[in-house]
Amino acid sequence: MSKPILYGMSGSRALRSIWAMEEVGIEYEHVPTNFGAESKTDDYKAVNPNGRIPALVDGDLALFESMAINTYLARTYGGDLYPGNPRDQAKVQQWSVWGISEIEPLQMQIVIQQVFTPEDKRDPAVIAGAGKGLQRPLQVLDDALAGRDWLIGDAFSVADLNVAAVMLLLGMVSFDYSNFANVTRWAQACYARPSLARAQNK
């Protein structure tokens, strides 16, 4: 049986799925693919017609979107990484969608300004507005983590991985969320996992 193939590169959102693949611990083929010309070729678009990364091929399954890839990997290969009951499975979906709808759009405003916009053209008001906007979802996350180590149950799950993976970009732009003590504690535990260190070297 052929190994799953994961397309993407660690210096991009594809890190989310590389992390998930390393966390489930199966053998896979990693095809480093950037988010520029390499992801726009006809061959690659046969895998992901959107021309974006990451993408996964597992047998006759071709899958795109990092949250879908990660949930599939956890459910198929991840053992306890994916919960066994419908209530907690729904929570996985909830938190995964929450991360890309509540955190990502605001953090991307900061990333675009600080990383992709020339310094003389940056708009401090955009950065400040996004930072202010992030306070609400970070408070939601902080409250959810009060008195518990992980988002679901008593162990690290794909819900934690997905949300923490989205929030990696906050570290890239040195966004300070240390006033949210539960989030800070949880994020440090997520980012200390050896699977992430391995993924970041891909």
Image (cartoon, helix red, strand yellow):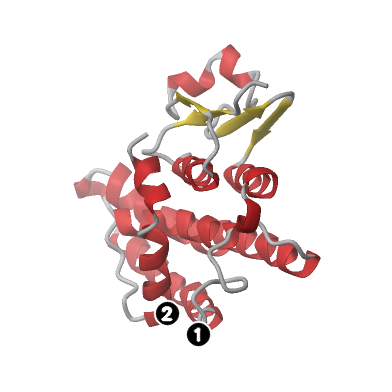
Whether the residues at callouts 2 and 1 have beta carbons within 8 Å, the answer is: yes
Residue 162 location (% of width, % of height): 54, 56
**Res. 182 mark:** 2
Quarter of the image with the C terminus is top left
**Image spot of residue 51 (x, y percent):** 57, 26
Extreme bottom residue here? 147
Where's the N terminus, which quadrant? top right
State the residue at coordinates (66%, 62%).
92
Which of 66 and 135 lies nearest the eye of the viewer? 66
Under tag 1, what secondary structure?
Answer: loop
**Disc 2 from disc 1: Cα separation:** 6 Å
Q: Residue furthest top?
A: 42
Q: Helix, strand, or loop for circle 2? A: helix
Vertical arrangement, residue 5 with respect to residue 138, above or below? above
Q: Earlier along the polypeptide chain: callout 2 or callout 1?
A: 1
Circle 2 Cα neighbour tier, 10 Å, few/some/many (<14 / 14–19 / ≥20): many
Q: Nearer the viewer, residue 27 or 162?
A: 27
How many tags in the picture? 2
Q: Percent x, y for residue 145?
A: 51, 79
**Which residue is labeled 1 in the image?**
146
Q: Is residue 41 left or right of residue 94?
A: left
Residue at far left of view: 120
| Residue 174, percent from left and from top | 27, 61
Q: Give amino acid for label 2.
A: Asn
Q: Is residue 98 above or below residue 153?
A: above
The residue type indicated by label 1 comes to Ala
Task: Answer with left or right where residue 34 lies relative to residue 159.
Answer: left
Question: How many other residues sit within 10 Å of disc 1, few (<14), some (14-19) or many (≥20)?
Answer: few
- Residue 132 shows in the view: no
